[in-house]
Each structure stands twice: as structure tokens, then as C-alpha cells.
Amino acid sequence: MDVNNISSAKANPQGKFIGTGQKIIQRQTENPDSPRLKYKEMIEEISKSCGIGRRTIITTLSEYKNRGTVTSPNKKKNVDDFDKNAIRQKVHSFWLNRNIPTLSKILTAVNEDNSLPNFKRSTFHKMLKSMNFVNSALPERNDIVSWRRRYLESIKHYRQQSRPIYYLDETWVNAGETTKKTWVDKTVNSPRDAFLKGLTTGSDGRQFMSARQKEPTGKGKRLIVLHIGSSDGFVAGSLLCFESKTNSTDYNHEMNSDTFYEWFVNIVPFFKKNAIVVMDNAPYHSVKTDTIPNMSWKKQDIINWLENKGQLIIDNQLVKSQLIDQAEQLRPRYKTYVIDEYAKSKDITVLRLPPYHCELNPIELAWASVKNYVRMNNTTFKLKDVQELLVKGVEHVTPEMWTNFIGHVIKEEDIFWKIDHISDEIIDNDPEKDEQHVMTVGTGDTDTSSDSDLDFSD
């Protein structure tokens, strides 16, 4: 084939995604056995015939060589709680270093981190607002800071009292969980070669093709998992595991308040006396014992609610807004949760984490260990086998490991305790704060591509 006679296809606009179909064309166009083409010439040939940039072709061929498949970058990128936690830590690392974290600084730091999604300025701004950061100096909302301070004060107080502290949380495990890299004997050239040598070809019979384990085509089915642990390890008999029906990226959609309540009631006998239970604010953790009226209620229903709470309504001229004001004054007294009240009846105190602070829950580190065990031992990618590995992974997490996880979290608590004071000091001493800390997003941003390519689900 004469490279010079190939008609050039219209190139994709710079920065445009290359779909899986085009990537497959690249792979099909590749002709590494041709004696007339050097590697650079082959790349040039594919680029001209497919209308795709050379760098994209090199990346795609490398991906196919290493993974045995190609993926599409057009899929929606999910920003999960771990990503949000990593971003929050980057913000606070600026404060720790006594450097004001402006939007531009944080965006640069995040986009330079290969473990995090790449953001446009406007998209990143929206996400930070969803995480309860405010203005361009990126301090957190006052209510979030106050919530965190109350939590840190409470957890420190309970530790000083030597009360047993339990940490609970949910997670998920995919049937397709697998380690990314494995050691492979490259002297094995085929299944027949392996048979003759008395060796293996790897977990799937095709391992000889690549230095990376062949991954399943998708994540497969999913298990929803709920557990609780303390410095004594995971609480025996408390593991709840069931198959996801939707395989949604957000397992919060599949856990419900009834399931959680039943599970919690069943594990309470396993707790030590006067226990503290740390949990987040997932909807199924936070079912209220009494609904507070709002403006969507009928006026008479609001009056009935107030009178049931002992309020005497003698002025028939009160409008709904005035009645709602009275209800709001009673909110602190009646804003209680079903699970908290049940725990209180058993001499158990529920302590709730501030939003987006999963790094303050040591069970997250335990989950990481459990999932790593599943990945390292998963060879069938069958849900039943993965569930067995999950149980073994839980057993693999020892009390000593839990003690280390809690110790790590205590260090994180100390950092947060210092950060709040440092941020106050820096902002108070900033002579340009009135001018510098004005957030203008969109001005000067010429990127017109969509901002909806990232999912900010909680």
C-alpha cells in the first residue's frame, strides 16, 4: 500500500471525543505485519484514512495492546463521594499551608491529579457549590463548619469517656471487581504451549496475550452491602448483603428506611453498653418521627398540627406564613429521627457525620480493604462467588486493622480542627479580601462544550 496515495479523511475537530466505533476502525486499519511500513508510517496511514489525530491513535493502540479492548470516552463520568472527599482535602491542604484556595488554584490542582476527573471551570464551580463551599476563597458554608465542629467536639468527648464507638456505612461490590495488573509468564505463547509445558495461561485462558488481566466487558451485577464495626473489628452477625436490582451508580436508591431500621434493630443486642453509633445522613438513616409543616400544607392542617403540639391558636386572622413561623419555632423540639429515638431507648447515642466527610468514617478504609481482597481473588466474575469473597474479605479485616483505621481518622480529625482556625486567621489578615474574593464564573471562559457531562450524585 502506498502511503502517499491514501486520500485524507476529514479530521475530527481538535478536542472532540473519539468513540468506540472509530477506535475499532483504528485497530482494524492497523497492519503491523506490513514489511513496508515503519511504526510512524503506520500511525500516519491510520490517521489519514480515519481522520483521527496521531496521538489518539497511539493511545488507542496502546490501550488495545494492554487491555485487549477499547473503551469509549463518551460515557458519563461519575463523581462519587471518594472524589468529593479528595477534592475537599485539596481545598483544606491550601488552608493548612496558609494559602488562600481560590477557584483557579483548586481547579488546577484537581485537573493535575490523574486520579480525579478533569473539570471545566464552570462545571467545577457547580460541583463546589453542591459540596457547600462558598465564594472564590472557598471557605465552607457556616452551617457545615459548625456541624463539623460539633461532631469533632462530641467524638472527642465520647472517647475521653471511654464509650464504645461503632461506625456503620453502606457500599457496593461489583461482580466484575478485578485487579488491574497481574504477573504473566510471557514465555507462554498459546493455550497449547501452556498445556505442553504443564503451565497455565492465566485466569481466563487468554492471559498470554497481555501483561494485564483481561477484564470483563462490564462491571456486571452488583451487591449492596451494609455493615458496622469498631476497634474490636466488624461486629459479628451484622453483615447485610443483597443483590442490586437496578445496578444504579447510587446504591442509596436501593436501600430503604424499612430495611435499614430492621437491620439496626437486629444488631443492637451485639453492642456494648452505652454505645455511640456514627453514621452519615443518608435518607434512610434520617426518617423523621414528625413532619414539620410547610407552605404546601393546608392552613387548617397547620393549625391542627400546632394545636396537637399544645399551641393555642386564638387569632383567626393569622395567615399561613405566620402559622409556619410558629411551627418553625417548634422545629428544634420535634426534629427527631426514628432511628435516633429507637437507639436512645436502648441507651445508644447516634452521632451524625457532617455532609461529605466520609474521611471521618474509618469503615471506609475497611471497605477499601474488603474490596481489594475481592479484586485480588475474583476469577469467575460470578455474583455468587463474589459474595463468598466478600464474606472472606470482611473476615480478613482484623481488629488490629480497625484500630489502625481509627487512628488514621483521628489524625484527620486533628487536621480539620486546626484548619478551621487557620482559615479564619488567613481570611481576617488578607488585605485584599474585599476585592479578591468575588467569584465570577463564565466570564472569559470560552469553552462552549456542555457542562452536564459529570454526575454530582451524593
Image (cartoon, rainbow, N blue to C red):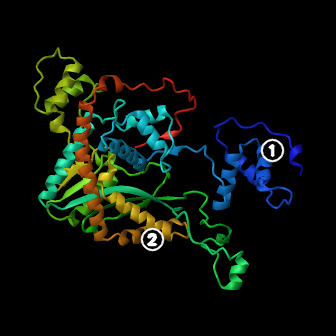
* Residue 186, percent from left and from top: 66, 73
Q: Is residue 284 left or right of residue 347?
A: right
Residue type at numbered disc 2: Glu
Q: Which residue is mark 2?
A: 388
122 up-or-down from 375: above or below: above
Badge 1 crowding class, 10 Å Cα cut-off, few under 14, some 14 to 19, many 20 or more, is some
**Residue at (45% x, 38% y) in the render:** 107
- Mark 2 element type: helix
Q: CA distance from mark 1 to mark 2?
A: 49 Å
The answer to which quarter of the image holds residue 138 is top left
The answer to which quarter of the image holds residue 203 is bottom right
Q: Is residue 191 left or right of residue 136?
A: right
Q: Is residue 323 visible?
A: yes
**Residue at (41% x, 39% y) in the render:** 106
The numbered mark at residue 49 is: 1
* Residue 372, percent from left and from top: 44, 65
- Mark 1 element type: helix
* Residue 247, percent from left and from top: 50, 52
Residue type at numbered disc 1: Ser
Q: Quadrant of the C terminus?
A: top left
Q: Is residue 352 left or right of residue 388?
A: left
